[in-house]
Image (cartoon, rainbow, N blue to C red):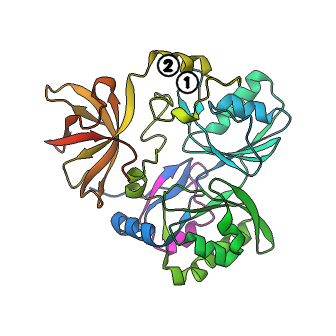
């Protein structure tokens, strides 16, 4: 297959760290929030093993922030998500499904409460800022909505705690999961959260001082040599094994939070007002007709760039495969699929056509590990 380059422009831009990662050998990109997001540094499987054993530095600047501030900021943020944030605390992060008037997924960001009247919505891949502005205009809310120039560096892996402690001091190792605080580097304070898109542990550094951010990026590699530090990126194998959902891949605006297994983030019994609440109440009463589940497929290789149908023995479609990858742990392909109600029970058998060949598979639970 002939390969093509992607031309950068103001519509599709790099990050402050692009020159670093290209020098470090990035081998592929994906597009995320109109930006280049590194997708691989050589072998996906080698990077998977390294992430689980050591520490990696990720350029995840494409994880953009929607800043909402002002008198009605809390009202607007709550209107956007089905999770009750009335008891949220400054200095904490909250995973929050954002839904539309039909109760379907717009995004699944992490929301940071910076002040009582200032929030950052750290978004997955969709234009949440336009959604927020539309709601604010329609509801005549007194808010200011912007995209601050914040470019995240993620430090992930079991040795990330020692590396970050070496640079910022032992206090950072005591930070609770999904907590954040401010730490000084190069004369600038950086918001650092105990978070990241892996289950191997780590931090996300919300860099809004580019000069000291670049110096910090280099410092992480200099100080990380004793921990076998390497450049990396969100790893497809690790995230599927861990059951970490990807908006736009595993779920989209046709799915509601119940169908995506996000029940614990849906607070329909609270008194808070949010968009699509009536639809989710109805869905809760009537039950869902489809559900995200794990699948194991008896094959050693697969590339999923679009949904693939799953069939029963009568050749009836019972769902669709949305993400999949070969897992070294299971020695087979594992994936995330949306299954219809009659077929989502664990151990249900199915068939899938891959490159013109019918392959067997089995439904299982999430997460895999």
Report helix, strand or loop for mark 1.
loop
**Relative horizontal placement of residue 175, taking residue 40 as reference (left or right):** right
- Which tag, 2 or 1, sits closer to the chain's start? 1
Q: Is residue 305 visible?
A: no
Report helix, strand or loop for mark 2.
helix
Tell me whether the residue at label 2 lies in contact with that at label 1, contact meaning CB atoms closer than 8 angstroms: yes
Mark 2 or 1: the one toward you: 2
Q: Residue at x 29, y 61 (%)?
A: 328
Question: What x and y, as percent, mark residue 98?
Answer: 60, 34
**Relative horizontal placement of residue 78, taking residue 241 as reference (left or right):** right
Q: Is residue 59 visible?
A: yes
Question: What x and y, as percent, mark residue 148?
Answer: 73, 51
Find the distance from the CA under tag 2 to the CA under tag 1: 9 Å
Question: What x and y, as percent, mark residue 129?
Answer: 67, 38
Q: Residue at x 47, y 45 (%)?
A: 246
- Whether residue 252 is in magenta: the answer is no
59 lies above or below 322: below
**Residue 12 bears which disc, if any?**
none
**Relative horizontal placement of residue 275, taking residue 288 as reference (left or right):** right
Range covered by the magenta-colored residues: 11-30
Give the farthest residue toward the right.
Answer: 71
Identify the residue position indicated by label 2 in the image. 283
Q: How many other residues sit within 10 Å of disc 1, few (<14), some (14-19) or many (≥20)? A: many
Q: Between 75 and 84, which is closer to the camera in this rendering? A: 84
Q: Residue at x 63, y 33 (%)?
A: 83
Identify the residue position indicated by label 1 in the image. 103
Q: How many other residues sit within 10 Å of disc 2, few (<14), some (14-19) or many (≥20)? A: some
């Amino acid at each position: 297959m002939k390969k093509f380059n992607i031309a950068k422009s103001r519509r599709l831009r790099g990050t402050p760290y692009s020159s670093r990662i290209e020098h470090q050998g990035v081998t592929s990109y994906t597009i995320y929030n109109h930006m280049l997001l590194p997708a691989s540094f050589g072998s996906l499987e080698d990077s998977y093993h390294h992430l689980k054993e050591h520490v990696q530095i990720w350029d995840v600047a494409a994880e953009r922030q929607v800043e909402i501030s002002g008198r009605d900021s809390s009202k607007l943020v709550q209107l956007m998500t089905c999770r009750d944030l009335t008891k949220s605390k400054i200095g904490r992060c909250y995973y929050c499904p954002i839904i539309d008037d039909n109760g379907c997924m717009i995004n699944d960001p992490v929301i940071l409460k910076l002040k009582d009247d200032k929030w950052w919505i750290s978004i997955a891949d969709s234009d949440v800022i336009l959604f927020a502005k539309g709601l604010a205009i329609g509801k005549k809310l007194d808010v200011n909505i912007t995209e601050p120039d914040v470019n995240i560096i993620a430090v992930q892996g079991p040795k990330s705690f020692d590396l970050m402690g070496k640079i910022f001091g032992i206090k950072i190792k005591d930070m609770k999961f999904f907590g954040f605080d401010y730490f000084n580097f190069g004369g600038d304070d950086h918001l650092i959260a105990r978070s990241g898109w892996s289950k191997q542990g780590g931090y996300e550094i919300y860099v809004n001082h580019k000069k000291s951010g670049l110096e910090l990026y280099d410092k992480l590699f200099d100080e990380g040599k004793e921990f076998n530090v390497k450049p990396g990126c969100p790893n497809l194998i690790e995230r599927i094994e861990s059951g970490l959902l990807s908006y736009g891949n595993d779920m989209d605006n046709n799915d509601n939070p119940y169908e995506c297994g996000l029940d614990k983030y849906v607070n329909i019994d609270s008194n808070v007002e949010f968009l699509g609440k009536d639809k989710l109440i109805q869905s809760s009463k009537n039950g869902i007709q489809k559900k995200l589940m794990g699948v194991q497929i008896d094959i050693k290789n697969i590339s999923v760039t679009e949904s693939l149908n799953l069939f029963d023995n009568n050749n009836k479609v019972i769902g669709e495969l949305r993400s999949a990858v070969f897992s070294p742990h299971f020695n087979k392909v594992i994936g995330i699929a949306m299954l219809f109600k009659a077929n989502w029970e664990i151990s249900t058998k199915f068939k899938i056509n891959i490159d013109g060949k019918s392959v067997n598979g089995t439904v299982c639970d999430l997460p895999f590990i």
